[in-house]
Image: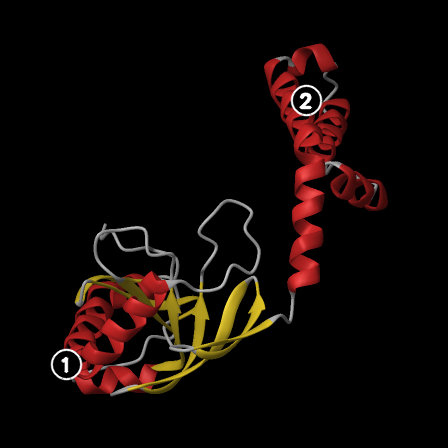
Amino acid sequence: MNTDFDLGDLARLAAENPMKMVESMMARHAEHAGKSEAELGYDVKQVREAAEVYEKQRPKLEAYEKQVEEAKGRKVNDPVFGELTWDTFWEGEVDVPGFGKLRLSIDADAEAHAVATPPGDAHRQAMTQFLAAAERLRPKIEKANFEYFHRVRENYAEGGAQVPDVRQPADIWKELFSPALHVPVQDGEAWRVELNWECSWDGEHGHAVYIEGGKVVNVGIQGDGYEPE
């Protein structure tokens, strides 16, 4: 039998404190299984401790959420990036040699809970370096995309995905769309940028190429990061 939940009550608890929602679900599961709260023991204790931590952090979280909401739509005119609008990231467009016009996002929150911090010199330097290297990098990115696709295509096919038949490196571009450039916080020794696409073989996660210091250092799904597996 399935456990019945009061969805309205769970939604209220989630808005108040997500860990209280978890505690309520655990209690309902226990009741359904004929267990007492004491039998849940350590698990309930952990959830309640997490709920207390959340309560202590709530004022800061609420203040941050208010800042985020108030900052949405803020604009800056950057000497390198052009006009940007803030909505979690700074967003705009950029014309990249060899790639054309791309959607642009910049993660410029260099400090914890910073909201709409404008891009800094390190972001501009990363962009300038990438634009200068883009045409030279394009064939290397093409080759890396093609090789990655052929490493993973069997896994996607076995999972039931409709996997295209890509025979030549240049054909991989037909399977990539909605290109975007992301400039992350520049916290390493070498400059970093990330190219993202939606792709025909993975509609859920998309595809990404991670560039560091002018080299392709990782290829994978969006969110993989700069360290290869």
> At 77% from the left edge and 44% from the top edge, which residue is drawn?
15
Identify whether 22 is placed above or below 217: above
Residue bearing the label numbered 1: 136
> At 27% from the left edge and 68% from the top edge, which residue is drawn?
153
In screen coordinates, is 123 left or right of 218?
right
Q: What type is the residue that disc 2 sits on?
A: Arg
Q: Name the image quarter holding residue 145.
A: bottom left
In screen coordinates, is 9 left or right of 130?
right
Name the foreground residue: 139 vs 28: 139
* Residue 96 placement (x, y as % from top left): 31, 84
Between the residue at mark 1 and the residue at mark 2, the CA separation in whole angstroms equals 55 Å
Count the labels in the image: 2
In screen coordinates, is 66 left or right of 198?
right
Residue bearing the label numbered 2: 48
Q: Name the image quarter holding residue 108.
A: bottom left
Q: Earlier in the sequence, mark 1 or mark 2?
A: 2
Q: Secondary structure at mark 1?
A: helix
Q: Residue 119, labelled with which disc?
A: none
Outermost residue, top direction? 38
User: Do the numbered discs 1 and 2 sit on residues whose CB atoms are within 8 Å?
Assistant: no
Q: Name the image quarter holding residue 41.
A: top right
Q: Nearer the viewer, mark 1 or mark 2?
A: 1
> At 65% from the left edge and 57% from the top edge, which residue is drawn?
68
* Residue 35 placement (x, y as % from top left): 72, 17
Answer few, some or many: residues within 10 Å of disc 1's Cα (few below 14, many 20 plus, some between 14 and 19).
some
Name the foreground residue: 225 vs 201: 225
Name the foreground residue: 187 vs 227: 187
Quarter holding the N terminus is: top right
Q: Secondary structure at mark 2?
A: helix
**Quick check: can you spot residue 18?**
no
